[in-house]
Amino acid sequence: MRLRPALAGLAVVALLPACTATAEEPERAPAAVDVADVETDLPPCPEQPDEPTAARDLPGLEIDCLGGGVLDLTAAPGVPTVLNLWASWCGPCREELPLMEELAGVAGDRLRVIGVASEDGVPQATSFAADAGLTFPSAFDGSGELAAGLGLKGLPHSVFLAADGSVAHVETGAVTSTDELRALVAEHLGVQV
């Protein structure tokens, strides 16, 4: 009888290494580095009109941008906007970000694409953004307050905002093609790109 508890304890100890992060898995914990202390080639977040959002769909956050400026979620963007929540450690984000980059490149003044590095560290996010060749602005939400405020778990997510700041649609999970992304923008924001 005494042998069974001992065997159960050994089984738990044997399983512990399987529950820990492996050497290949990137660091997920936000690093204690201030956004202002890291240099990046990312553009600053765009200026927003001095106009509150039409609806309180988003958490009332102001998020520092990796390239400077602030993304104020209490203010209307003034232009239909796609907020793409991503992280350096997120495999599906790595596959989706080139599609967001392409969308940002063809959107012109009709649509804005803004990334939100979520649940990540500043050095990891800026390094990944540089490696991915991102040219659209990205805010930094290391603790994932935006996703949590929207009740979202995991990454990536894309939040489609109308010009007045109301949430038109939330796409959970990765968009897998340019055609799918363009169709979502047309359907939910009424913008043809």
Image: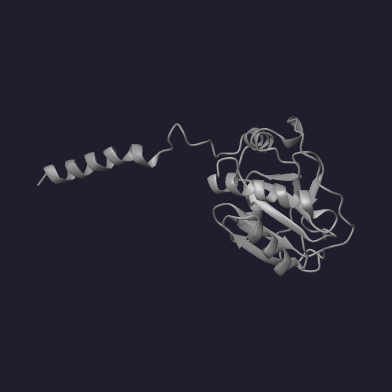
Residue 71 percent location from the top left of the image:
78, 50
- Residue in the foreground of this view, choosing between 180 and 62: 180
Residue at image coords 59%, 52%:
156
Let me know if residue 46 appears in the view. yes
Q: Is residue 172 left or right of residue 16?
A: right
Q: Quadrant of residue 107?
A: bottom right
Question: Quarter holding the C terminus?
Answer: bottom right
On screen, 134 above or below 78? above
Residue 138 percent location from the top left of the image:
73, 45
Residue 179 percent location from the top left of the image:
65, 59
- Residue in the foreground of this view, choosing between 9 and 53: 53
- Residue in the foreground of this view, choosing between 99 and 47: 99
On screen, 1 above or below 173? above
Q: Quadrant of residue 121?
A: top right
Number of labelled discs?
A: 0
Let me know if residue 58 appears in the view. no
Q: How is the image coloured?
A: one colour
Residue at image coords 84%, 62%:
52
Q: Residue furthest right?
A: 50
Q: Residue furthest front?
A: 179
Q: Quadrant of residue 189?
A: bottom right
- Residue in the foreground of this view, choosing between 149 and 182: 182
Residue 106 percent location from the top left of the image:
78, 52
